[in-house]
Amino acid sequence: MSARLVIALAAAFVVANVSEALTQQPKLDFEFFKNRVEVVFLQKREGHTRCYVCHSENNSAFRLERLSPGANFWNDEQSRKNFEVVSALVVPGDPANSRLLLHPLAPEAGGDLFHSGGRQFASRNDPDWRILAQWVKGQTESGR
């Protein structure tokens, strides 16, 4: 095999792998969402209303399912609906460009200028913000 052919094949292999890596986005994991992300929406944060209170009543793009009477958490069908709605508010693999993470983040930390629910997250180091970011990055319930 000639050196030119080897170089051409190697270059084609590299281009194919780089192209594939650039076009692959992490997959959003439903189990991680259900077990770790939805909990954040129900959590009472000091000085703030829970995300659920406003976002189960409003008419925005981030609209959570109402809990069933007497329930403390969503059933599987409700969680699947929440997953679909919330997934549309993120760019898989890119927390820095995901509305779900930017809208409630303080402007000083790179968030949106206005969020009627206040600054739920003062910084990107907030443990709950980091859970949302992990999900957007493709974290799975199994830890991969």
Image (tube, helix red, strand yellow):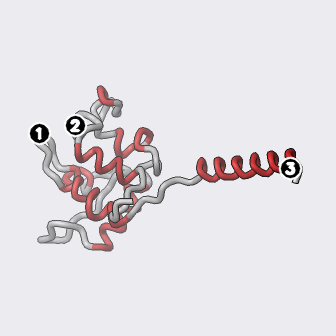
Q: Nearer the viewer, residue 106 or 67?
A: 106
Q: Which residue is mark 3?
A: 5
The amino acid sitting under disc 2 is Gly
The C terminus is located in which quarter?
bottom left
Disc assigned to residue 7: none
Circle nearer the viewer, 2 or 3: 3
Q: Give above or below for 12 relative to 142.
A: above
Q: Is residue 79 rendered to the left or right of residue 44?
A: right
Q: Is residue 50 rendered to the left or right of residue 80?
A: left
Residue 62's spot in the image, x, y percent?
A: 34, 52
Q: Give above or below for 81 relative to 131.
A: below
Which numbered disc flags the more N-terminal residue, 1 or 3?
Answer: 3
User: How far is mark 2 from mark 3, CA to CA?
Assistant: 61 Å
- Neighbor class of circle 1 (other Cα within 10 Å; few <14, some 14-19, many 20+) is few
The N terminus is located in which quarter?
bottom right
User: How far is mark 1 from mark 3, CA to CA?
Assistant: 66 Å
Q: Residue at x 29, y 50 (%)?
A: 131
Disc assigned to residue 118: 2
Which numbered disc flags the more N-terminal residue, 2 or 1?
Answer: 1
Mark 2 vs 1: CB contact within 8 A: yes
Q: Residue at x 28, y 44 (%)?
A: 129
Disc assigned to residue 47: 1
Q: Can you tell which quarter of the image residue 7 is in?
A: top right
- Label 3, secondary structure: give it: helix
